[in-house]
Image: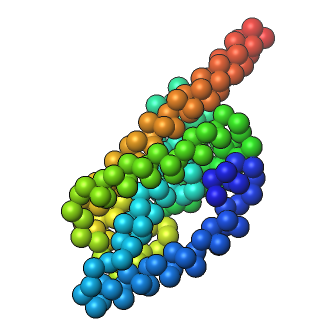
Amino acid sequence: ANIVWCFGIHPNSVISVYVPVFITVTMANIAAFQAGHPLPDAKYLMLYNCIYFGGQGNTLCLCLCMFFARSEKFKAMRKLMLLPNVFNITEPVIFGVPVMLNPLFFFPMLLSCIVPGILGWVLLNILPIAYNPTVQLPWVMPTFITGFMQGGVLYMLTIIACIAVTCVLWYPFFKVADNQAYAEEQAIAEQQTAE
């Protein structure tokens, strides 16, 4: 889904293939939970919140990187994009930065599910998280709140750890874009001063 988004294709075309599997697994885990049996695929469901925060590509992390921006471009974008991104609406970032059709952001988009997915899987296998699959919140609910409601503080902290690692992944690529934007702004300012 992240790869096709880089090339301008909305990820719903890919995600729609995956949704029936996700719903089937969710329903099986709800049935097991209600019957008092061990959850067959709880870690699979829990991993979803570790790899999907701030919309496709985990662009919430890109928005958080904008707090370290030098350029006015990214300072202004942060004000416009952060709030929708907290609620998993990624289109302002994808089209506004832009991330789509931008080779600079291809690798962080590609790795933005893999890196937190590995960390999330390790933490989910180590930490004693009691997961409740019957808690199903809307997709626009901030992921860390969903994590708290479904699995308590440990699950929420697991998601926050995945967000932090993904911010580290996004930051070097953002810094290149920010430096380019800052240099362009300085060149325009110098040109205006010269006139």
Q: Residue 38: horizontal and vertical position, in percent?
A: 27, 79
Reply above or below: 32 against 16: below
- Viewer-nearest residue: 27 or 109: 27
Reply above or below: 32 against 168: below
Q: Residue 15: horizontal and vertical position, in percent?
A: 63, 67
> In this view, which residue lies farthest toward the right?
195
Q: What's the residue at 65%, 72% (across, down)?
A: 17
| Quarter of the view holding residue 181 | top right
Q: What's the residue at 42%, 67% (across, down)?
A: 44
| 112 relative position to 141: left or right | right
The answer to whether any part of residue 78 appears in the image is: no
Q: Residue 13: horizontal and vertical position, in percent?
A: 71, 67
- Viewer-nearest residue: 20 or 184: 20
Q: How is the image coloured?
A: rainbow
| 140 relative position to 8: left or right | left
| Quarter of the view holding residue 129 | bottom left
Q: What's the residue at 40%, 78% (across, down)?
A: 136
> In this view, which residue lies farthest toward the top?
194
Q: Quadrant of the C terminus?
A: top right
> In this view, which residue lies farthest toward the bottom?
35
Q: Quadrant of the N terminus?
A: bottom right
The answer to whether any part of residue 89 appears in the image is: yes
Q: Residue 122: horizontal and vertical position, in percent?
A: 33, 52
- Viewer-nearest residue: 39 or 26: 39
Q: Total number of numbered labels?
A: 0
| Quarter of the view holding residue 90 | bottom right
Q: What's the residue at 69%, 12% (across, down)?
A: 190
